[in-house]
Image (cartoon, helix red, strand yellow):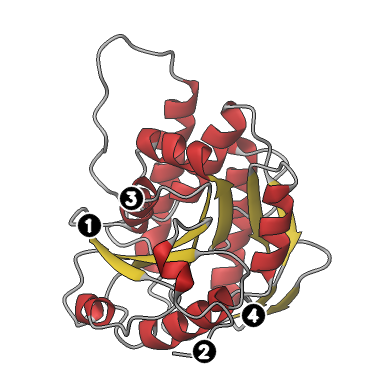
Amino acid sequence: MPPSPRGDEGTSRPPLLEIVIPAYNEEGRLPGGLLQLCAKLARMPFPTAVIVVDNASTDHTAEIVTNWPRGPVPVRLIQCAIPGKGAAVRAGLLGTSAPFVGFCDADMATDLDAIDHALGLLLSGERVVIGSRAHQGSLVENRHSRIRELGAFGFRALAGALVQGVSDTQCGFKFFEGVLARETAARLRTSGFAFDVEFLARCVERGSPVREIPVRWHDMPGSRFSPARHTFGIVLELGRIWVRLRARPRTAPQPAWEPPLDPVGYP
């Protein structure tokens, strides 16, 4: 673990920032991702922490976290048996307590220097700050196929109808005021790929506009998304979100989840 100018004192104070990493069978990418993230957070002038959510992995993802060396940035494990990235992010956010929280992907495709920008905006009063690959200031390395690009264009068009004014709902780099994130996570019902759309729409619904920031983003190998296998389920998921957001409140309690249409939902 890289040394920190804070030494180990950050572990004895409550964190100002907690970052959630949803992980499903990430034994290959998680160690490198954790090293990068912890090295970045160790240079922050305040306490931080990392939560890895093991989403019912069948590899050694959980063991990597439980055996992670103790250092200036605490890393802890949360288990989530419900399949889907949305379920994992929800579990992780509900396990936080910090004033500011966020989540990012295990592959760290987004350059972590953007954390400084995001946190600065949160400290200045913004409540939702997300990375956007569509921002004119972003630098994006993209090796996706033409078919996947076409699918992404169609998804953005549908998502834009649900979260107006947001150009990229799916970049795996999002930060929030902590109370808002936990209250929104408690209401989240989408467990698969499109969970970001519902999450951001509910933030806007609560009067918290989304601030997009430029990022440096590198396409990383290991994506599990397949246009042939997942497109139909994603369209249905977006339809469910559309109905859910426009439904009138009911007096009877609603179930926390619906049957997942995209059982994994990881990039």
Relative to 62, is 41 on the left or the right?
Answer: right
Name the front one of labels 4 and 2.
Answer: 2
Residue 94 found in image quarter: top left
Name the front one of labels 2 and 3.
Answer: 2
- 255 and 6: which one is in front? 6
Residue wearing tag 3? 95
Graded by Cα atoms within 10 Å as few (under 14), some (14 to 19) or many (20 or more), the crowding at tag 2 reads: few
Q: Earlier in the sequence, mark 3 or mark 4?
A: 3
Relative to 183, is 214 on the left or the right?
Answer: right
Residue wearing tag 4? 142
Name the front one of labels 1 and 3.
Answer: 3
Q: Earlier in the sequence, mark 2 or mark 3?
A: 2
Graded by Cα atoms within 10 Å as few (under 14), some (14 to 19) or many (20 or more), the crowding at tag 1 reads: many
Q: Amino acid at mark 1?
A: Cys
Rendered-image quadrant of the N terminus: bottom left
Residue wearing tag 1? 80
Residue wearing tag 2? 3
What separation in Å lies between label 1 and label 2 (alpha carbons)?
A: 31 Å
- Secondary-structure class at tag 2: loop
Q: Residue at x 68, y 74 (%)?
A: 113
The image shows residue 148, relative to residue 169, as above or below, that is: below
Residue 51 seen in render: yes
Name the front one of labels 3 and 4.
Answer: 3
What separation in Å lies between label 2 and label 3 (alpha carbons)?
A: 27 Å
